[in-house]
Amino acid sequence: MSTDPKALYQEVILDHNKKPRNYGALDHASHQAEGLNPLCGDHIHLALQLAGDTVAAIAFHGESCAICKASASMMTVAVKGKHRDEAQTLIQEFVDMATGRPDPASGQAVGPHIGRLAVFSGISELPMRVKCAVLPWHTLQSALKTGGTTSTEAENDPMHTPLGDA
C-alpha cells in the first residue's frame, strides 16, 4: 500500500470495486432501502438485519460506479456489529467529510469515528463524485429510519440545491 493519499484512495477504490465486501442479497432483512443517483445512474439496494439495536448483518447490491460501490462496501464493513446510534454517527461524519464540512465538535475535516473511511476525505474536491460516495450512506440512513427509496436529488441531500437557488 502506498503512503500517498491519492494513490491510497485509488488503491482502496479499486480493491473494494473489484471485491466488494457484503455484496449480495440478505435473506430475512429487518430493514431495507433503495438508493438512486439519477445523474450518474447509481442504483443500489441495501438490506440489514438488526438484532435489538445492533447491525447484525448488512448487504448491498445493484449497479453503480466504482466510487459508489467502494463506499457501500466500506460502509457495510464499518457499521456491521455497531449499535444503531453508532451507525447514525458514522453516517453524519462521513457525509460531513465527503461534503467538506468540518466536524462540529473538533473543527477537523474528519470526524473521530471515521477511521479507514478517511480515504474518502478528498472526495469533497470532486463535486461531481460526492453524490456517488454519499449515496450508500443516505440509503443506510433511510433503511434505519423508514425504509423505502432515497435519491441524491432529494431535499435532504446535502449537495441538493433547488433550481431557483442555484
Image (cartoon, grey):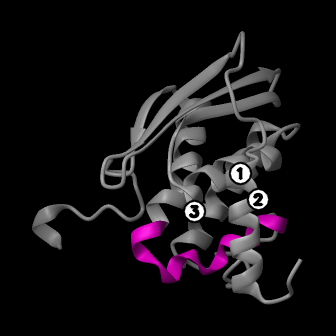
- Residue numbers of the magenta segment: 115-129
Badge 3: residue crowd in 10 Å (few <14, some 14–19, many ≥20): many
Earlier sequence position, callout 3 versus callout 1: 1
Question: Residue 15 bears which disc, if any?
Answer: 2
The image shows residue 148 at horizontal and vertical percentages of 45, 25
Please say whether residue 116 is one of the residues in the magenta stretch. Answer: yes
Residue in front for this viewpoint, 140 or 22: 22
Q: Which residue of the protein is positioned furthest toward the front in this rendering? A: 18
> Image height check: is 164 above or below 88?
below
Looking at the rendered structure, the kind of residue marked 1 is Lys
Kindly state the secondary structure of the residue where label 1 is placed. helix
Residue picked out by circle 1: 18
Looking at the rendered structure, the kind of residue marked 3 is Val
Left or right: where does residue 135 sit relative to residue 1? left
The image shows residue 63 at horizontal and vertical percentages of 49, 40
What residue appears at the point 36 percent right and 54 percent down from the top-left corner? Answer: 40
Residue picked out by circle 3: 95
Measured in 3D between alpha carbons, the distance from the residue under mark 2 to the one under mark 3, in whole angstroms, is 22 Å
Q: Nearer the viewer, mark 3 or mark 1?
A: 1
Label 1 close to label 2 by CB (< 8 Å): yes
